[in-house]
Amino acid sequence: MSAPATARVGHIHLRVSDLDRSIAFYSGILGFAVTQRYGSGAAFLAAGDYHHHIGLNTWESLGATPPPEGHTGLYHSAFLYPDRQALADALARVVAAGVPIDGAADHGVSEAVYLRDPDENGVELYVDKPMSEWPRSEDGSLKMVNGRLDVAALLALAKPASQN
């Protein structure tokens, strides 16, 4: 039995230590709109008119510290952008906000930039390449790579902040 090809990850829900700080990151920098606040302890954010792609709450984590390295938990959440322009615009906002970039890669199937949110949760911002360009082994199986992504060239595509 397998999941249907149309199944998708619908949203992530994160425990955060400071709700307003996390909203400032996911809304103010990444650009997701707040669709609802749930009292003083939770908020829901989305791209477009979806009910939510991101849930944030402090119900069990208000003022908490990030989990220590080397423990299980979320490695990163990944946000798929529709095209390189949209990814470049998001990356430009990240850089302008002074958020450090942990890394960037061309995976053959996608181009990705990695960073951390205010609670040290890993965040991947990426764009898929057309499936026809995905690298394949001789037997036709997918062969993802971990190549260099030219971040400067990607940033050069970003619209000026006034248009972003």
Image (tube, rainbow, N blue to C red):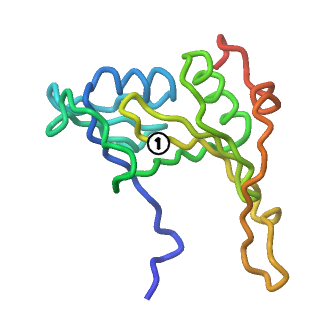
Q: How many marks?
A: 1
| Residue, disc 1 | 122
What residue appears at the point 24 percent right and 29 percent down from the top-left corner? 37
Give above or below for 74 relative to 6.
Answer: above
Q: Residues within 10 Å of mark 1 (few under 14, many from 20)?
A: some
Question: On the image, which quarter does residue 125 sit in?
Answer: top right
What residue appears at the point 82 percent right and 62 percent down from the top-left corner? 133
Is 64 on the left or on the right of 25, as rendered?
left
Badge 1 marks a residue whose secondary structure is strand
Foreground pick, 82 / 121: 121
Is 30 on the left or on the right of 40, as rendered?
right
Q: Position of residue 100 (x, y in %)?
A: 57, 26
What residue appears at the point 39 percent right and 21 percent down from the top-left corner? 24
Question: On the image, which quarter does residue 23 sit in?
Answer: top left
Foreground pick, 1 / 62: 62
Q: Image quadrant for the C terminus?
A: top right
Is 37 on the left or on the right of 105, as rendered?
left
Q: Position of residue 94 (x, y in %)?
A: 58, 24
The amino acid sitting under disc 1 is Gly
Q: Position of residue 53 (x, y in %)?
A: 40, 44
Q: Position of residue 21 (x, y in %)?
A: 34, 21
Question: On the image, which quarter does residue 45 sit in?
Answer: top left
Q: Image quadrant for the N terminus?
A: bottom left
What residue appears at the point 20 percent right and 27 percent down from the top-left corner? 63
Farthest residue in the bottom direction?
1
